[in-house]
Image (tube, grey):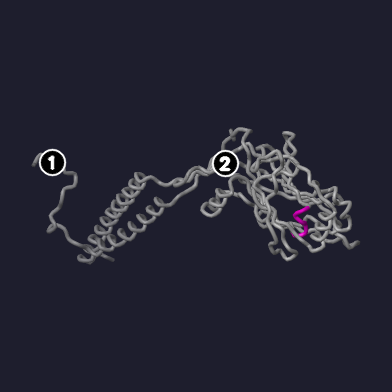
Amino acid sequence: MRALKAFDLYRKVPRDLTEPTVSGAAVSFCTVILGLYLFISEFFVFVQRRWESEMFIDESKTEEKLQINLDVTLPNMPCELLSFDAQDVMGSHEVDAHGNLYKERLTSKGDFIAREEIKNSHYGASSTLTRHFSYSYDNGDVDRIRNMIHSGEGCRVKGFVKVNKVPGNVHLSTYSHSYLFGSLYQETRNMNISHKINHVSFGVDEDIGYIQKHFKGTGIVSPLDGVSQVVTEKKTGSYIDSAIFEYYTKVVPTTYIPLDRPKMNVYQFTANSNKIMNQQMPSLYFRYDFSPVTVQYKETRESFSHFLVQVCAVIGGIFTVAGILDSVLHKSIVHLAKKAQFGKLV
């Protein structure tokens, strides 16, 4: 047992050989307060989650499809005259494209009338782009569309479509129904592409919603939400001039790696807009191009071993400094007391 005691690095001093002092109590109080403050600070750093970002070249395959989520309201455009088209740099021009898209008919006050899915063509495919199919309208249909325009019907296009992951555009226009404009010339002069963008994003919409709710400040995934454009009447006439609105987006692939759920791949983007006044068919274009760089956000948290090291460093540092300070104060007070005892304090 004596041999074992010889290894004791922390030898004890009998309690009757120590004495408490006022300076020691003051230093002890400050030490405890400072120690608790630093411990709590380190604990909050330990439980806090942080995002670390890095960038690297995108190596995804060009065969992959990109999901575009749309929710656009057009208060002065009947659904019957509106088509959704797409085109990309690979030469693919899809007229009246389809995906999981819906048209909602709206009254002049914005109230809901009816909803219908944008029909698939005879080429099939409900979630990828398909090609144009012909519409057949008789005189009764023309009168019905004329009544829609006179009553001020609007349209809301909502859903998603999948396109090739190459630069291109998707657009809402009246091109697929342009042959009707001869029979509806007077009515279409007051029809325009005024719109409000309720939501536009790239990627799986559920992941984007989760990121917007839980990971605020880590990316720009829907900067066009809430943007609206209105076509006004010409000052020199009673009819509304036609216009084409274009939104240019630069899409940046972005990966989120949270601690408690699987990896999510979404797309940030920046956007600029342009308005062209002309006498052509009113249209709304969303043009997109891709950045070759991918941004990755990884959620991290301090390890327990690092937290333990930090706590030990805090405790050891505080007590060491406090011991030195207490020793200096005690010796100074004893020295001053001796001088005062011999009348040499002055």
From the top left corner, tell me how far across and down residue 260 is, in percent. Answer: 44, 47
Q: Which residue is drawn at 12% across and 59% down?
A: 16
Residue 326 visible in the displayed image: yes
Select label 1 or label 2 by which is in front: 2
- Relative side of 261 to 15, left or right: right
Task: Give the residue at the far left of this rendering.
Answer: 1
Q: Position of residue 271 (x, y in %)?
A: 69, 48
Report the residue at 63% width, 38% height from top. Answer: 65
- Please state, as top left, top right, bottom left or bottom right, where the C terminus lies in the image: bottom left
Q: Position of residue 19 (x, y in %)?
A: 17, 61
Q: Which amino acid does label 2 sit on?
A: Val
Majority secondary structure in the magenta region: loop
Q: In which quarter of the image is the N terminus?
A: top left
Q: Name which of mark 1 and mark 2 comes first in the sequence.
A: 1
- Name the quadrant containing residue 242: bottom right
x, y (%) of residue 284? 76, 50
Give the camera-side residue of 309 and 218. 218
Query: Which SS class for mark 1?
Result: loop
Would residue 88 be counted in the magenta stretch? no
Q: Which residues are the magenta region?
A: 75-80
Q: What residue type is labelled 1?
A: Ala
Q: What element carries label 2?
A: strand
- For disc 1, the marked residue is 6
Say whether residue 289 is left or right of residue 207. Answer: right
Left or right placement of residue 120 versus residue 211 in this view: right
Residue drawn at (71%, 63%) of the image: 110
* 77 magenta-colored: yes
Which residue matches tag 2? 295
Cα gap from disc 1 to disc 2, whole angstroms: 59 Å
Q: Is residue 92 above or below residue 47?
A: above
Q: Which of 302 and 287 is in front in this view?
A: 287
